[in-house]
Amino acid sequence: MDKKIPEPVLSNDHQEVTKDLHRHFNFTLGRFDTDDIRGYMLTAMALTVRDRLMERWRITKAHEQGDKIRKVYYLSLEFLLGRSLGNAILNLNMQDSVRQALADFGCTLEDIEMEEKDAGLGNGGLGRLAACFMDSCASLGLPVIGYGIRYEYGMFQQSFQQGRQIEQPDHWLIAGNPWEIERNNHTRRVKFYGRSEPFTNDKGKLCMRWVDTQDVLAVPYDMPIPGYKNNKVNTLRLWKAAATEEFNLQEFNEGDYADAVAQKNLAEEITMVLYPNDSSENGKELRLRQQYFLASASLQDVIEDWIKDNGDNFEAFAQYNCFQLNDTHPTLAVAELMRLLMDEHELDWDKAWGITTETMAYTNHTLLPEALEKWSVELLGELLPRILEIVYEINARFLALVAHRWPGDVDRQRRMSIIEEGTIPQVRMAYLGIVGSFSVNGVAALHSKLLTTGLFKDFYELWPEKFNNKTNGVTPRRWLAHCNRGLGDIVTEAIGPGWKTDLAEIEKIRPFADDPEFRARWLEVKRKNKEALRARVIRKCNVEFDLDSIFDVQVKRIHEYKRQLLNILHVIHLYDRITRGDVAGIVPRSVLLGGKAAPGYALAKLIIKLANNVSQVVNSDVLVAKYLRLAFLPNYRVKSMEVICPGTDLSEQISTAGKEASGTGNMKFMMNGALTIGTYDGANIEILEAVGEENFFLFGLRVEDIADYRMQNQPNAIIEQDEDLQRVLRLIECGHFSMFEPGIFDPIIQSIRNPMDPWMVAADFRSYIDTQHIAAEAFTDKDRWARSSIINTAASGYFSSDRTIMDYANEIWKLKSCKL
Ligand code: 26W
């Protein structure tokens, strides 16, 4: 079919960009004065860039229209996008003209970039992964649409008061969001509450309908996702909740205006705030409403689109549509698709189930038991009665299958049931995801293996063909080209620019590790990046890092399994040695920590307090200062990482083996030439294999060891035999880091001494300390370090999200790229 594909007409040259910038500044924003212009300048520039995105968005859509193409929908409660301007400018190749245009206004690009707020619509790894995936899909020309929630308040902002975490709301939309386009005409209606009732339709068929519901409108806001220099712009559609007209009218007619408006809030609270928990969210109804709201609005959107071209004929639906579920959060989509197909479009159960199980794919991101979502049957029944009914039916048919396969094995039926029986019966969302999907994947090799041998073993025995691994990745555009121009430029000079779209090519810099001149330039760039990081730490923490010291960094959510505590114990150990005058072999070190604790996670918050208190003591001791500094960076987020990873020497990836599903920070650091000190966990294992043992500092127990060890884990015996650990604990216990608040760190001490400590802090202490020593020694050999650093970057090709997405596209989605 001949399609009319428009061409981009807006020019990227400096004059045109300047003209548009003026026009937006003066006319779109109505600014004529020149005072305090940065914020407006940012918006004007965003609009100038957006005009160019708009054209390419239209072109991308024109390509996709008309002849049918298979599309994928990435359903996620979180998209942690960070800033958009720099990324869009990079992808549209507008850097030079933008800089020149801004110069006319006496601004630099850096000046206005600073003004952009992060879109913090996610907690951590899972949300940022979704954002990297969107970037890769657009850059690979894949027809993938993201569906998420437009939270009014993103991830909270963190500050400290006497070293304790304080949370403040993140009203990121307050100054407007130039990147979003409201698409009122695609508004959907989502049902809640009410009841399910049988009826006979006009064809005499017995059907079910969901009645007396309280509906909420879902209004879509589209964000453009630009591909890298390929004229592609994909869509991220974020839903905002709004009250229906009737919702207000009913009360309004009863004369109660104020109540009517209050009711409106009830509907709109659904998309008010992102839940700031990255491991457990226990039974909050509002969270369940968010999940169903996303699933229902998105599925209706896709089905509506299908009906436009195909009417009520769903024969080929599965051939052209595929849904990737980002963890269990959107897995109600399984039951919702069944409902829409049966109740709204009159398909029978078997047809609907065939379509559902051919279109849904589920990704698991965690093995932590507390992070495995369950919803009480009671709550589901009240909020979504029709959905609960469908879940029960799915389960009944599934258990019949299990009974058929393993006759008489009632224990297995109980184990595998989607409904967990007990005093409070619950729906196991992961099981619903597995039963309803044709693909189930983990996010790193070890993690995927642990899923099939542990958590999902029964299901693996039933359906081995469903299970697969897709090791995570990160986008090399944001995480190298954009955030580390210095390094990107010398890589490009050495091997050309091909690595930006095919990171496997970066392997070609490996031979340069032997080139002394290249190594010198490499270290020079690293030093500049360390300067930038140092400046930020001074500004945000008032701590001065020594440029020549090893920059040792751990930034990520605060969680016991990630073991920031182990890191702090090492700092205390060094402090203890230095104050005792035992400084032989101590290499100057600057330790940076950063990350948010879930507001209700008391021990994680106490770990932050400990870090801050230790940093007070360490940094104010002039004798210690020569060797050791510790800073805790407040409000760690995407944009902080853009400064942190280029300036890091040593990346801390020290989770208890078997607990970190993959990790993605580990990949960002390695890509930027940091060396890793890490456990045999998640994607660390694959990083280690890629760089070789001599370029990685491996320590600690392995998963296999831990199972045996746990039985006879005796932290107190370990402590007794380890003088260093004893001294470290004694310093904490005696109140050295809490002079005016004695005993506040007791819960931390107890957790370490607890024979049931799941995180094995005491057990890994010795091996960690010794390996840190080896790392420090290695750092003193500048040549060797530079070589290892180059090799880390060279080996990072596999960890590009482009590779991950190609694996999803080929093996799960069966998508062909539609390269322009
Ligand atoms: C119910 C609340 C909740 C919210 C988020 C539970 C669990 C989560 C996520 C699973 C937390 C998360 O971000 N997991 C991380 O996902 C990354 C991307 O796959 C992995 O790299 C990390 O190892 C994993 O912890």
Image: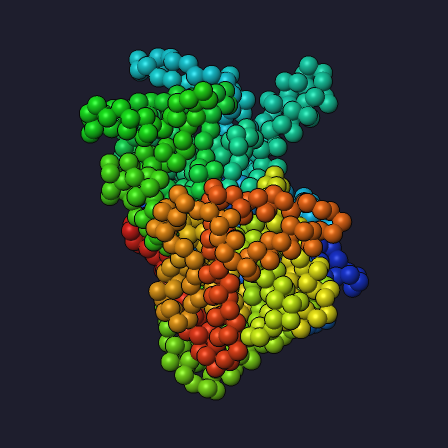
- Does residue 69 appear in this view? no
Residue 679 quadrant: bottom left
Q: Is residue 117 above or below residue 349?
A: below
Residue 31 quadrant: bottom right
Q: Nearer the viewer, residue 653 or 210?
A: 653
Q: Position of residue 803 (x, y in %)?
A: 36, 60
Q: Position of residue 602 (x, y in %)?
A: 61, 41
Farthest bottom residue in view: 517
Q: Nearer the viewer, residue 319 or 22?
A: 319
Residue displayed at 59% across by 62% down? 573
Quadrant of the image containing the C terminus: bottom left
Residue displayed at 55% across by 60% down? 724
Residue displayed at 58% across by 33% down? 270
Q: Is residue 513 above or below residue 69?
A: below
Q: Is residue 67 above or below residue 108?
A: above
- Classify residue 94 as left or right of residue 692: right
Residue displayed at 68% across by 45% down? 743
Q: Position of residue 389 (x, y in %)?
A: 39, 21
Q: How is the image coloured?
A: rainbow
- Does residue 291 appear in this view? yes
- Classify residue 426 as left or right of residue 751: left
Q: Position of residue 456 (x, y in %)?
A: 33, 39
